Amino acid sequence: MASNFTVECMDCGHQAPFFAGTPSCPQCGSFWREARYDYAELSKTLLPLLQRRPFDLWRYRELLPVRSPNPDLSLGEGGTPLIRATNLGMMLGCPNIFIKDERQGPTASFKDRQAAVSVASLKEAGIQEYVIASTGNVAISYSAYAARASIKLWAFLTSLVPAAKMREVAIYGTQVIKITGSYDQAKQVASRFATQKGIQQDLGARSIPCIEAMKTISFEIAEQLATLLGPEPGTNGKEPTPLHAPDWYIQAVSGGMGPIGVMKGFSELQQLGWTSSSPRIAAIQAEGCAPMVHAWKQGRDTAAPVQSPHTLIATLATGDPGRTYTVLRQKMLDASGGAFESVSDEEAYRAMHFVAKMEGLSVEPAAAVAFAGLVKLVRAGVIKPSETVVVNCTGHTMAIESNVLGDGWSRDIVLPSSTAVAGEAIEEGLLAALSKVATDRFPRILIVDDNADVRRLIRRILQSQGDYTLYEATNGREAVEMAQKERPNLIILDLMMPEMDGFAVMERLQTSSETAEIPVIIVTAKELTQAEKERLKGHIQKLMQKGDFMSDDLSDEVRALLR
Ligand SMILES: Cc1ncc(COP(=O)(O)O)c(C=O)c1O
Ligand SMILES: [Zn+2]
């Protein structure tokens, strides 16, 4: 922590030194305060220091409210990868989508930052017992850090939290109190308990350590984007800056702490002169519990509480965001704007599937809400193809809830018991069982495109949505040969290919009775002229524009044509 670090009251402006044991303003009693540092001084000294430090959250220690970080409490928090979402980017036609993989925190969610800094600051203040209310992940993270710091933790959890998460909280030795009711009710009970027992409680977005912890996400993103994309160029007469802010930061939101912290982080980077802009924030809520989205869209600065959240995504079930929404909205309006959007549980579950199948990341439903929001905002034209977007992948899926997968996600093979039959019989049993999972009973689809990335993308989309036997052809001639040899049930055809283009392929297929009936979907980047459209008329089943269709559009079309 920097020596000249103070906290300023957002209500009366009073400045006071920070002490974790005194969470409110000594002058007016307000809990809404913000940390302030000497940015002019730090802008001169900190950057060279960073270059020598490991990539974790404590590399920014001069900008955190902990006097001397104790390595014995650390679990390796922060320093998560920023991954380019190549396939998702290709599907959406946005080449600069990045995923901040917060699943890689010690307990697999971004709340590890908050817990690490909060618990470190509690420990410094000599606090030995603490109360939290949680929709799951906060309780898990605090439990892990409290265990290391020997702080006794009371966790009040809504009964909506999946049992696997509750057990995870308990294994760290936390006292778990399950409240049969909403998360807001669990918070009220926790608060009453804390007051009654005289134990300090977590104040969420009103807590200095929580907000300060969350801002490290912005610092890391700006450093990582500078490595991946280069420093920000100096535009409009501005000097180039050493770090690089994205155009958008997207996060699934419940209480709203993450975006407030992240905005503060980007604002500090500008004050330090390390970036020239801050991203717009896209805060995404679950449709059945979206008080902030409703208020934002109605232009209101207070959010009407949702009394009974209707979402299976318990992690995001804050029905009453209170003043956090007002603060967040004001900050967004003061900065470069942003968006609040909601998505349905189904959209989030679909996003879980495509993020796993296209990018190799298994994310929890709450994290998937951000990805579903990304799709919605790109489709609506709010996020532009040229913009740099960072999606916070806030948490890893645990013990996948059955409603996400539905039925039929596994193929079961029952082998004859080895004691009952011997030798050849076992072999036969195995072959018989495997024949059931043979691929040739699946519809056959030929993908024709000279661009390997496009073939790969289409393959991934199809594989993620059903069982198909897929063939690929890299040019027109190969496509015609394969169509004749393999007789696919469907062809997905590119138009612009060297030598023999898609038009010529179509015409050749029409000349043979064996291939003339095969349905064709054209996937093209080309703006077709009227004459070209005429040429295709009657010969193709569907025309799709590259970068403009979603995985669902393509697979719905494929399913319909194969029916
Ligand atoms: C995985 C995950 N994503 C998103 C959120 C929403 O975070 P917040 O609204 O506090 O920024 C949470 C909150 O617990 C979470 O656990
Ligand atoms: Zn005050």
Image (cartoon, rainbow, N blue to C red):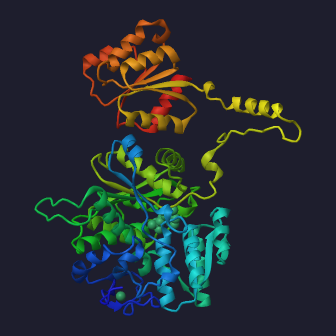
- Please give the name of the residue rendered at 42% of the width and 85% of the height, measured from the top-left corner: 66
Q: Quadrant of the N terminus?
A: bottom left
Question: Would you say 88 lies left or right of 365 here?
Answer: left
As drawn, 521 above or below 22: above
As drawn, 136 above or below 89: below
- Please tell me in which quadrant of the rendered image residue 199 appears: bottom right
Residue 219 visible in the picture: yes
Q: Position of residue 148 (x, y in %)?
A: 58, 81
Question: Would you say 121 lies left or right of 180 here?
Answer: left
- Please tell me in which quadrant of the rendered image residue 69 appears: bottom left
- Please tell me in which quadrant of the rendered image residue 94 appears: top left
User: In front: 33, or 86?
Assistant: 86
Q: Position of residue 289 (x, y in %)?
A: 51, 59
Q: Position of residue 549 (x, y in %)?
A: 39, 36
- Please give the name of the residue rendered at 60% of the width and 85% of the height, measured from the top-left corner: 150
Residue 301 visible in the picture: no
Q: Quadrant of the C terminus?
A: top right
User: In front: 311, or 404?
Assistant: 404
Q: Quick check: which quadrant has ligand 2?
A: bottom left
- Please give the name of the residue rendered at 66% of the width and 39% of the height, measured from the top-left corner: 408
